[in-house]
Image (cartoon, rainbow, N blue to C red):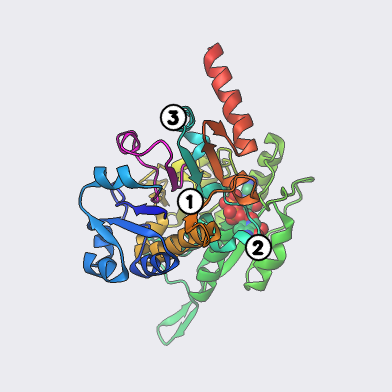
Amino acid sequence: MSTVVFVKEQRLQERRCSCLPNNVKTLVELGMSVYVQKGIGKTLHIDDSKYIDAGAIIASSRKKLLSVADYVLSIHPLSQKDLNETKLEVCCISFFDPFNSPELIEWLRISGRSSLSMELIPRSSRCQKMDALSSQASLAGYVMVAEAMLALPKVFPMMMTPAGTIKPTKVFVIGAGVAGLQAIATAKRLGASVVAYDTREAVAEQVRSLGAKFLNIDLGNTGQNEQGYANALTSEQIELQQKAQAQCIAESDVVITTAQVFGRKPPLLIKNNVIALMQPGSVIVDMAAESGGNVEASVAGKTTIYNGVTIIGTGNWSSKVAYHASQMYANNLQALLQEFWRPQAQKVELDIADEILQSALITHQGELINLNFKALHTKALNSAETH
Ligand code: NAD
């Protein structure tokens, strides 16, 4: 029987958790032994008794829980102190931010522990129910619009009143992936006039189907990889994009940037000279502020003012709607465990030949598994050695 452990999140400001009582019920009914840390649902006002009623074993000692786990599941990766308490055969499942955590990954590999990174779940129909990047990004898109709405001293919809006519707020969304499309849909629902841009022309139709306009910028060859992720632009293309979108930014009340290139630093798309063209009181929300920023003036974790423009880089977006973010993330984890549950063996078994695990497993029995990550990681370690 597999022992599956869900621990409390330890990061400041994190209100989400990795498991709700209904997930416990499903996993226990399958045959898993489910342990949760006491108080896991406290930030969501879910009492421990609900987890117990669903079949979980509750323990207050984190150390003890970690020591019995075959699988430890969380949102953020375990700390080094926590990892030291786990069995060598454990598999830790969380967002690992693997491209920015080379030392942690190397430690996991050398120690022989397995790590499964939720960022590396493939983008395929089979994996949609496990796709935590998408579930959290979609909520982030919604939250970013809500944050912009509260910071902007204007209303979003057009209003024709005896006291005068109010024009709809102009929103420009840069990057129309999962988060961007949800931001577009949310801003439209609130009555804003929305324009969007993405380097992947394939999304123009999706943008239009939400009732927004697509800004056409000819950058030449852009495209996407087989997973649907955008290819990185050349520096000339980025410069071209910065120039071509400047007027649209200057005319917008709200700009929301969600542009990412998987496994790389996000592209810098809005420089300070363009922010200076915006009307004071306007708002920019930079989804990427914490990982380098799409906006030159954004500050990770903070809301700042530049030239009269409010720039929101607070991050941790989905945690602001913690209940639904937890529900979706916990369902993603549940689907992953169900996928590898083997009823005859009454165990979760990691078949590393499976395409999901070939992508999502970073370390397993002393090896690096995800090939893209392995190539980058080996290169980074070699270059660290030669310097
Ligand atoms: P992401 O977070 O990596 O990037 C966000 C968006 O930024 C993308 O749309 C990307 O094209 C865009 N971008 C990159 N550079 C840009 C630039 N210079 N200017 C403007 N935009 C830029 O991507 P994501 O939102 O996680 O997903 C991207 C795509 O992956 C989806 O739209 C979809 O096609 C695909 N996807 C597929 C599945 C599935 O099949 N299960 C699930 C989720 C996503």
Q: What is the three-letter code of the residue carrying label 3? A: Ser
In the image, is the residue at mark 2 within 8 Å of ligand 1 by its beta carbon?
Answer: yes
**Residue behind mark 1:** 287
Q: Check disc 3 and report its element: helix, strand or loop.
A: helix
Going from the N terminus, do you reach mark 1 or mark 2 first?
Answer: 2
- Any part of residue 149 in sight: no
Q: Position of residue 140 (x, y in %)?
A: 46, 59
**Residue behind mark 2:** 125
Q: Position of residue 290 (x, y in %)?
A: 44, 43
Disc 3/disc 2 C-alpha distance (Å): 34 Å
Q: Between tags 3 and 2, which lies in front?
A: 3
Report the side of 293 relative to 213 (left or right).
left
Residue most toward the front? 344
Q: Quadrant of residue 59?
A: bottom left
Q: Between tags 3 and 1, which lies in front?
A: 3
Q: What is the three-letter code of the residue carrying label 2? A: Ser
**Residue behind mark 3:** 111
